[in-house]
Amino acid sequence: MVLLNITIHELFLTFLGMLVVVLLLIIAVLFYSFSQYRELLHISNWSRIIDKKVSQVIVFGKEESAADGEFTEVSDNPSFRDLFLEKLVGSEKKFSGTAHEEIKDLFRAYNLEKEAFSKLSQKKAYLIAGGIQELTSMKVEAAVPKITALLSHPSPAVYQEAQYAMVAFKGFEGLRFLDTETHKISDWQQLRLLISVTAIPENCEQEVNGWLRSPNNTVIIFTLSLLRKFQMLSFYPSVWHLLSHPSSEVRIRAVQTLLSLENDQTMHALAGSFPEQPLEVQLEILRVMEISRDQRSVGFLKQQLLEHSAAGIRIQAAEALFTLGHQEYLNRISRDSESSEELIQIIKHALQEKIC
């Protein structure tokens, strides 16, 4: 057994050392808290000043609100300018017309594009994406070349914001990145892009057909949404060819698009292609027959109800027949003593779903 000879003096020094460390930690925490508090006070005060400035410009115009000593005093502070830029971008989304233009004039008057441009050279993806968003929001056309270069950035946050910027600046022409796009385009991103395209040029057949043949399934799916939005009937044959695409999701979106571009033969043609389709596509075909309310589909729907091997298909066929006004037929089949128990349950389930 080893005896440790620790003197009272040594214990005192150890205790004193620990006490000093604790005091230093307390001082550091207090200093950090105080600095955070001061920063919050600055932000709160600056937000008030900025909100006042923006409100004055919107209500009275930039000429009447030009003399503002409180604002001018802090307008050169880098942190204040970053907050000012953030506030302007947020305000721009809330207004339109004259107010919208006044906000952009305020952005230009204080040369805030310098701050936004500087973010494009940063290393952090969120800063670059923020800069793109700010320059796009304020319609800084001079930023287009730099933003174009960021379409190939490795960060999704950056290249997605760059994609949106291209369409915001150029409309349909800004969709050219789809020619070579290899990344998956999320549903949210597709929606943003779709909303931003407000018109389609007359001579766009080559581009659109190229996107419909893209190896990137999400590019095809987005293009189909574009066709539905603008009712681009001339692309009906190209959409029809997608019913043989390897992806079931693409086939489903193609069926939906064919409904949107529907002609007199669409439902008959879909019935003809039905046996070649996987189960999930067959379900979608029955859904669009239900939506179209084409009475010429009734015979086909009855056939699927009575003969198809998949219960899901039979249920969908029964629901479609109900929607098309053939409830009496379904009731008669369910009461028929020769109907199988499975068929009766399928019809009851479909009727219950529709009635509920």
Image (cartoon, grey):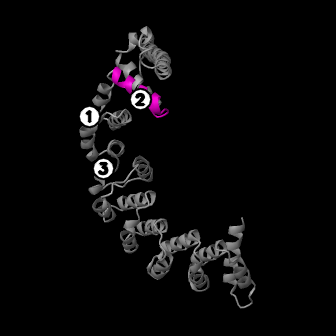
The mark found on residue 316 in the picture is: none
Image height of 235 relative to 222, above or below:
below
Question: What quarter of the picture does the N terminus occupy?
Answer: top left
Q: Disc 3 to disc 2, how far (Cα)? A: 24 Å
Q: Nearer the viewer, residue 229 or 186?
A: 229
Mark 3 or mark 2: which comes first in sequence?
Answer: 2
Front position in the image: 203 or 8 = 203
Spatial CA distance of label 3 from label 1 is: 17 Å
Image height check: is 221 above or below 278?
above
Is 70 situated left or right of 115 in this image? right
Q: Which mark is residue 173?
A: 3
Res. 101 mark: 2
Q: Amino acid at mark 1?
A: Ala
The part of the chain drawn in magenta is 92-109
Q: Which residue is mark 1?
A: 142
Determine the residue positioned at 30% across, 50% down. 173
